[in-house]
Amino acid sequence: MRLLFIVVSGHQVASGNATDSPYPQGTIKLQQPHFLKLGLDLTSFYPATINAKFECFDLKLIHWHYEFKGIKWVDNYPCEDFRFAKCIIHSKSYSKSDSKTESYPAYIYQPVIATKIGHFQDKNVLEIISVKINELEYGDQYILEIENGFIETN
């Protein structure tokens, strides 16, 4: 399944770039060691999320490759549950003579809403962790490729 998305601004808490963030390192860097202990190595991925907005009203991750429950990643807050689904981000960069598509390994990163502390996303936005994409900017269009049946859209 391939879905077109636009990169939009998020809360910038995952990266630690938010001026009011209680996590100057970012939430992803704080969470990575917990995921690694449970078998998901994200150390080669950029410690932030891409906020991917899709052209639908609502989309849901209905299957995933990893699910971690009761993760106590910071002392001041209750445990959270997380789900991850393997995916690929495809970008198209065009030159005068030809076009080429670049692909980046990634995971949909989904803190489960029932246990999430705050910083909620719109219903048509998914957070994605990927390797660093240097040319990525807000407003850019990319394609998310994921196994059929993993995402439901409305």
Image: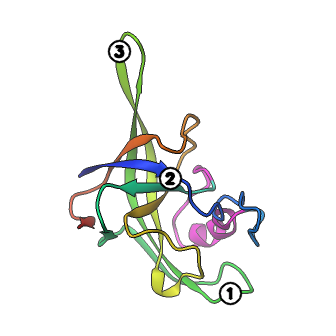
Q: Does the CB distance between marks 1 and 2 fall below 8 Å?
A: no
CA distance for labels 1 and 2: 27 Å
Q: CA distance from mark 3 to mark 2?
A: 27 Å
In percent of the image, x 74 and y 86: which residue is there?
A: 76
- For label 2, the residue is 8
Q: Which residue is mark 1?
A: 77
Amino acid, disc 3: Asp
| In magenta stretch: residue 29 | yes
Counting from the top left corner in percent of width and height, residue 78 is at 63, 89
Q: Sequence-wise, which precedes: disc 3 or disc 2?
A: 2
Quarter of the view holding residue 71: bottom right
Residue 125 in picture, x, y percent from top left:
42, 62
Residue 98 circle label: 3
Mark 1: which amino acid? Tyr
- Residue displayed at 76% across by 72% down: 22
Nearest to the eye among marks 1 and 2: give it: 2
* Three-letter code, disc 2: Val
- Badge 1 crowding class, 10 Å Cα cut-off, few under 14, some 14 to 19, many 20 or more, is few
Q: How is the image coloured?
A: rainbow
- The segment highlighted magenta reads 26-46
Nearer to us in this view, 129 or 58: 58
- Label 2 neighbourhood size at 10 Å, few (<14), some (14-19), many (20+)? some
- Residue 51 position in % (x across, y down): 49, 56
105, 49: nearer the viewer: 49
Asked if the residue under mark 1 is in contact with the one under mark 3, i.e. CB atoms within 8 Å, the reply is no
In this rendering, the count of numbered labels is 3
